Image: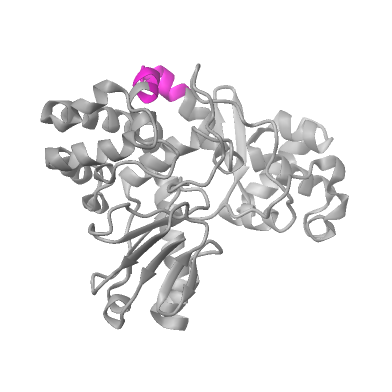
Amino acid sequence: MLRFHFSAEDLARTRVAAAPHPLWEIASSLHRFQTPAGRWAYAHWYRTARERLREAGLEGVVRQVLLPLFPRTSYWPDFLTPLEGVAGLEAGLEAILATPADRVAAELAALARIGRVPAPLGRLTEKEARVELVGILRAYHRAVIEPHEEWVHESVHTERVRLARHLLDGGTEGLLEGLGPAVRWRHPRLEIGTYPTQHDIRLEGRGLLLIPSYFCWKGPVSLADPRLPPVLVYSLHHEVPAGSARTAADAAGSPSLELLLGRARAAVLRATAAGATTTEAARLAGVTPATATHHTTALRDAGLITSHRHGNSVIHTLTLLGATMLSRNVRRAPSGIGQGLLPGTDLLTDRPVRGA
């Protein structure tokens, strides 16, 4: 359980980040590589990210440096996601370089207490080693985050518009009540019941910075050290009911979606949940490729899917609107998409974590 304790002054100082925080997005995207949970929501990114890391020659450093530093567990070092990152990637990287050596040492020691930390990472107390780390983070961002920045920024902008409506209708408490099912406002506390550790943060007039994250999946996350400026990073979307995905063959039990779109078009929409080419969508929906092309065009024109060229194929994936529509008719996440990112990198157990 994570609780933020608010005063009237804290309510007045609560705000929403104006843009994605690039270092939190790096952290959350690395977690996406370590679990199949929610992979359907990132299928359009995941497929190309694997190739871009390989083409950039970053597979080794991701495995040897970044995954150990950003494990999908209850803790990773706070200095890797500094508040300065709200001003952009370079500001955040400069803050990492400026972190005092004693703080780096203490946080690496905390990381070592919950798992193995490769010995070379202990050198991060040295400025030269952090310069190297900053270069790796910059290269990783360029390879797998930057190509999708327009998508990420659009998603954060959409979330800010949504929260603005909650703020206008219900004030700051209305905004806090609208953060999603994982976050509960119980005046004067904001509670995350699924948090892996017992953590109470008294804001004491500092307010709370809300950071919507594209790559964060479901579980909100905060900094481990309560003395640092308080932040709450939370998932923008992708809320799917517990259970399993339904295939085109058993879709007949969702009359609302089929009545709205028609049986074949609804089946094509479901096929795109895990990311699908036109041929794959046609096979899953039981229609010809020409018919699938007709339906994907209509779904794209309606704003329910988006299409990205990938080599000689086009991959179709859900938009926020499409995911919202489909989530009311889906029972569990699609199967068959739990392949690991990097050769020799196993997916970690899907367990409660500080970061989603």
Quick check: can you spot residue 317?
yes
Membership of 139 in magenta stretch:
no
Where does the image place residue 327, in percent across and percent down from the top left? 68, 55
Numbered label tally: 0
Q: Is residue 185 above or below residue 28?
A: below
Quick check: can you spot residue 164?
no
Closer to us: 54 or 36:
36
Please report the residue visible at 28 percent of the width from the left and 54 percent of the height from the top: 225
Membership of 56 in magenta stretch:
yes
Q: Is residue 350 above or below residue 88?
A: above
Closer to us: 124 or 45:
124
Please tell me in which quadrant of the rendered image residue 167 appears: bottom left
The residue most toward the front is: 113
With 85 as the anchor, is 348 left or right in this view?
Answer: right
Extent of the magenta region: 51-63
The secondary structure that most of the magenta stretch takes on is helix
Where does the image place residue 39, in percent across and percent down from the top left? 58, 39
Where does the image place residue 292, in percent across and percent down from the top left? 75, 37
Where does the image place residue 30, in percent across and percent down from the top left? 42, 35
Coloring applied to the structure: one colour
Q: Is residue 53 above or below residue 6?
A: above
With 77 as the anchor, is 271 left or right in this view?
Answer: right
